[in-house]
Image (cartoon, rainbow, N blue to C red):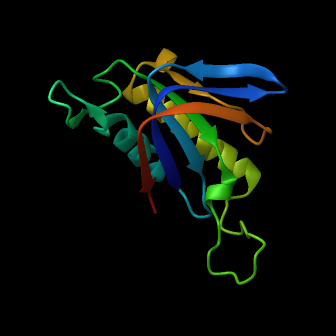
């Protein structure tokens, strides 16, 4: 499981040209589910994300979590994070990504776990496997990559 986490001033996701979800200050999470990922990976990663201290405190040090700043979270499924880098050639292979049904189950579990560690109304999502337009204003920029195997 891989998560690209971006600290944002705001972010939104559009589906069919309509805003589906949007957030203010908080985290945009691009989440890739790999073959072999487990429910425990979801729980562990969700806890790590919610507790991740990447927001500035009064001394301008990254010392606060999304909970500490009363921020929001937008979670977007993104199988393209599961790139198989060992393949030769120029066309990417996503053979490491989990099959759609299982990936969706784990994506939904990850969202559920995020909500269990934080206020559920602060957690927003896209739609699994939908064609989405994601907009954001990155704050910093701060981008963190977390992986759980």
- Which of these two is toward me, 1 or 7? 7
- Which one is nearer the viewer's eye here, 87 or 104? 87
Residue shown at the point (20%, 32%) measured from the top left: 60
Q: Is residue 94 above or below residue 132?
A: below
Q: Residue furthest right?
A: 16
Image position, residue 106 (x, y; %): 60, 46
Residue found 71% across the figure and 21% down from its top: 20
Residue 72 seen by the camera: yes
The percent position of residue 8, horizontal first and vertical second, equals 47, 31
Q: Residue at x 31, y 21 (%)?
A: 69
Q: Nearer the viewer, residue 119 or 79?
A: 79
Position of residue 74 relative to residue 52, above or below, is above
- Residue lying farthest to the bottom in this orientation: 88
In the image, taking residue 118 as reference, residue 133 lies left or right, namely right
Quadrant in which residue 30 is drawn: top right
The answer to whether residue 39 is visible is: no
**Total number of numbered discs in the rendering:** 0
The residue depicted at 44 percent of the width and 22 percent of the height is: 25
Give the image location of residue 112, x and y in percent: 52, 31
Residue 80: which quarter of the image? bottom right
Answer with the quarter of the image where residue 68 lies.
top left
Q: In the visual, does 136 lie left or right of 129?
A: left
123 vs 18, nearest the viewer: 18
| Outermost residue to the left | 59
Q: Is residue 137 left or right of residue 82?
A: left
């Amino acid at each position: 499981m891989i998560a690209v986490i971006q600290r944002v001033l705001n972010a939104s996701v559009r589906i069919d040209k309509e805003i589906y979800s949007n957030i203010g200050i908080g985290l945009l999470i691009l989440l890739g589910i790999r073959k072999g990922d487990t429910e425990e990976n979801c729980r562990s990663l969700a806890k790590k994300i919610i507790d991740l201290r990447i927001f500035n405190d009064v001394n301008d040090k990254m010392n606060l979590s999304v909970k500490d700043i009363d921020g929001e979270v937008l979670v977007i499924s993104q199988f393209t994070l599961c790139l198989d880098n060992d393949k030769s050639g120029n066309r990417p292979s996503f053979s490491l990504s989990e099959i759609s049904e299982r990936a969706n189950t784990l994506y939904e579990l990850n969202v559920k776990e995020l909500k269990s560690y934080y206020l559920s109304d602060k957690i927003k999502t896209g739609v699994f496997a939908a064609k989405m337009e994601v907009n954001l204003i990155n704050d910093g920029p701060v981008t963190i990559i977390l992986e759980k195997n």
